Image (cartoon, grey):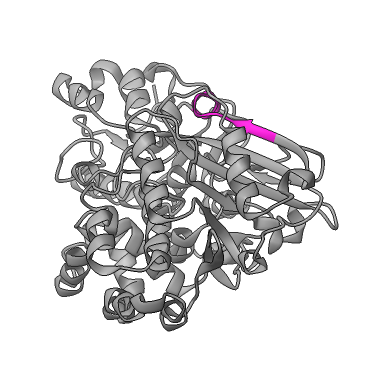
Amino acid sequence: MSRECEALVVGSGPNGLTAAIRLARAGVRTLVVELDQTIGGGARTSELTLPGFRHDVCSAVHPTAYLSPAFREIGLEDFGLEWIFPAVSAAHPLDGESPVLLYPSARDTAKHLGKDDRNYLRLVQPLMPEAEKLIGQLLDPFALKKDLFNQARFGARGLPPAKWVAKALFKDARARALWAGCAAHSILPFDFWGTSAVALVFLLAGHLAPWPVALGGSSSIAAALERAFREAGGEIRLGQKIERFDQLPKASRYLFDLDPKQLASICGNRLGNRYRKALSRYQYGPGVCKLDFALSQAIPWRDRDCLLASTVHVGGDYEEVAASERAAWDGVYCDKPFVMVCQQSQFDPSRAPSGHHTGYAYCHVPAGSARSMAPEMTRQIERFAPGFSDCVLATNETTASGFEAYNPAYVGGAISGGAAKLTQLFTRPVAKLDPYRTSNPNLFLCSQSTPPGGGVHGMCGWSAARSVLRSLKRQG
């Protein structure tokens, strides 16, 4: 049977589409097949509550997407993507005092950290001159051998657990809270090695550019990727449910924008037994529970400065945030969960009818949880935004188990593609010199279960496509 394409990509998330674009631009005849009737994976936007209220289904705010070397190489702005930047990246409200703000300027941020101002600058300023290049290298494992001095300087700060850095460097509650909010993006307990690296990346990204949202919703990122792929001659087929490998069209190379469990299930014996066993040991980590709100007005934060930020870290002081993240990892529910709140409509009026707003909030929960966290999350928001509940016109909740039902790649509700433990950071899903290649030379993994991991940045797909091109070159 003749091949319908040279490369076939299963899954149209940002990584799958990015891989497909790189292959198609290199002259490889590429086909993308997608289970759903819309593309996008974690970059979708939909009316989840009321007509006219457009909610991001998964990803919402995009610091790494804006800084992604892959997206810059593709030129997403040339395909209709428009970024909107808030005044500040993140706000972290505290009880009884003004919120901590992550300003574009490191000095402006430090000025509001009390006696920790100098220590904060000592932490981030040495990295700022090469921060954009550094983040690009951290997102590209094939670039890690470059600029070793700068990477070593980052590693000295990023390898220790976030708990150690908080204790050794910060004495004031404000700096410790800012650090905790950024470290919580790791979805790991703060005594895990490497959690400081995640906190640092988010801080540095905020000092390079305020964490942006995409005009019209996160689906605009997927739409720009689709336009770039089609311009390169690629083809997309929707509504293709793939459960067995023999359902796939014939191709020379196959790339899977799926989780390791799906990869093993579809490919079966085409993967070596040892490789499949290694995939079965992969850890996914906690899930998330998410609330979408249709609001009659902007969130009524006690301190209006919180409205300056695209993201509000709701969870009180360092100790409270750390306890929440530890609980989710240990499979325990937290009465005061750390809540990520995003307020896209504050900067993008197209998200809601005139005079109204959308709200987006999630917390980390035990893997596979079907429990509603709406009461606990709402109380946490009310704590810093009195009267919030009176603004809510409608609510949509997605539990961790609901996320997995929506997208099987979110195993147990883990939206990051797997735990970002140090032992799984550059060896995900299996320890290999080329983590995108499976045990079968024709099968590749391009999802966020490969380095550099979760987030809408396309770099997993970009690097996987590089591996495919190298294999095709060797074959030729």
Tell me the residue at 42%/52% (across/down). Answer: 458
Tell me where residue 417 appears, x and y as whole percent.
38, 38
Left or right position of 335 against 476: right
Tell me where residue 406 appears, x and y as whole percent.
55, 27
Between 8 and 159, which is closer to the camera in this rendering? 159
Q: Quadrant of residue 310?
A: bottom right
Tell me the residue at 53%/24% (across/down). Answer: 371
Tell me the residue at 51%/54% (across/down). Answer: 232
Left or right position of 55 against 141: right
Query: Magenta residues, as a range?
Result: 396-407
Tell me where residue 398 appears, x and y as whole percent.
59, 31
Residue 23 visible in the picture: no
Relative to 298, say whether 364 is above or below: above
Between 362 and 56, which is closer to the camera in this rendering? 362
In which quadrant is the N terminus drawn? top left
Residue extending furthest toward the front: 96
Between 195 and 456, which is closer to the camera in this rendering? 195
Left or right position of 417 against 236: left
In which quadrant is the C terminus drawn? top left
